[in-house]
Image (cartoon, helix red, strand yellow):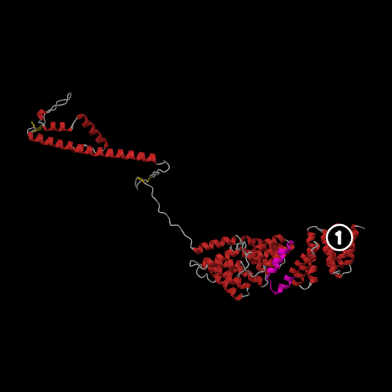
Amino acid sequence: MKHYFITGMKRQKTIIGKLRHIGILSILILGLIMPASAQRSRRGAQTKKPSTVKTKEGQVAPLSQEQLEARNKELVKQILDLQYERDFYKKKIADWTEAQRLATEEEKKTPAAAAPQPVQPVIIPYPYGGLQPPVVQPEMPKFRLSLADSLLRAARATARQGNYEEASRLFAQMVKQSGCHDEHYCEYGKFLYSMGAYQQALPVFNLVVNDDSLIAIASYYKSRIYQENGANKLAEVEMLRSKILGRSYKGYEVALGYQLLSQGQIDSAEHIFTGLLKQASGLEAEIYAGLAEIAYQKNDRVVEIAALQKSLSYNPGDLRNNFDIGVALLESGEYQSGLIFLQRAGNYRQSDIDVHFYLGQAFYHLQQWDKAIAEFQQSTTDKQKENEQRLWLAKTYYIKSLMAKSAGNFYDATNYFRKAREAHPDANSWMQAALSDLAQMFENERNFNQALDAYTQRLRLNPNDGTTLLRLGELYYRIGDLTEARNIFLNAMSVKQSAAQAEAWLRQIETYNP
């Protein structure tokens, strides 16, 4: 009969409710122990007949005393089991109620935002199962850069900002680390190559030995270094190595273009460079630099400047290209623009090019005399340019002397003139050159009176200078003083080198003012 009772909270509550209606369990137990004849039904209920059993003959016979007692004992046992089960669930209910009370009090003490959020279940479709908690993915290990990689990134960023000295220091620190590979050596070599430090770049490129694609790149730059130093045989070996290992890398073709350029085959080199621009070679900066060199040899400053600008758009930190475009702009009269590029090149002072010499010229034409003197004094040109350097320094000191004299400061004027004589002994040459430069500067500023004064002082040094006579006569013509212009051109007629042009100017004056 026990299997008719279902365990659980609902069944337990039903049993307790019935027991409360029945009364005290002890009375029920005593009633069960009493003989069947002594049992009474509840008021209003049908009287239960005595228990009977069927005999073999089909007759119904009453239970014996022993059977009745056995059945009553079984009922008592079932009732005791129900009582035990009731007490068990009653305790469970009390414990659960207390736990809920404590949890409610704890929630009141804890702010709502701090309460942990329940994990939302994820429904996994058939056939893998029903409701499951979300799977927590294992945390992926974070990738950590080596010290060499960190230094490489820092050096690249610093070089892009134009701080080449700091970039050089970071690269030098990088190659001392144990984690250096072909990529690190190749990048450092390319940086040194861009800075014009060829002798330092060559041993760094030699450290690239494992990756074929990087060896091809290193071989190209080594071939260019050998070409710049006149080692053509070694250059050809590196060119072939770049061709074999590089496959699609165009280092061999670019190096071949430079080789033809050095041999004077300008048209062939230009054909190669122009054809390579139609392909994505990764060497665009080198190709445009080659086209700029071709334009320089053709004396086409406009094309040269445009090609150098293109080259710098691919590699802004290339020292050689910044230097070349600065000089090209300087020679084209674009002094301010030329100064900007020359100052970029001057940020890296370990190169073998003399940036200071051209920086001095830029400051000179911009009439920043003290800065020009400082740059000329730092200039370390070779023997072939030494005389030119001394001439520029003497011209600058002489202009400072003229300015001091004009201001009435004769002591400084004498001192600057003495320094000019110390810089260059041929005073007549640098005095004439300085006066010509001043006259041209004043003309560009439309300061015609000072320009006339500078040309007049130059004629005092050399009255038979046909070029100065023509410039002075033209200036008088431009300001409308035709009488003085005619006199100057008549004097120029006596000088062989300026006679023809002076005659043409005189005819124009007569036509304009018959």
Residue corresponding to mark 1: 476
The image quarter in which residue 76 lies: top left
For the record, the magenta segment spans: 366-390
Q: Amino acid at mark 1?
A: Tyr
Q: Position of residue 6 (x, y in %)?
A: 23, 38
Quarter of image, res 243:
bottom right
Image quadrant in which the N terminus is located: top left
Q: Quick one: 33 or 219, which is closer to the camera?
A: 33
Residue 374 counted in the magenta span? yes
Picture coordinates of residue 390, whole percent (x, y): 73, 71
Q: Main secondary structure of the magenta part?
A: helix
Q: Which residue in the rendered view is the most extreme toward the front?
A: 411
Q: Residue at x 87, y 57 (%)?
A: 480
Residue 193 point in image, percent of width and height: 60, 68
Q: Quadrant of residue 263?
A: bottom right
Q: Is residue 177 visible?
A: yes
Q: Residue at x 33, y 40 (%)?
A: 102
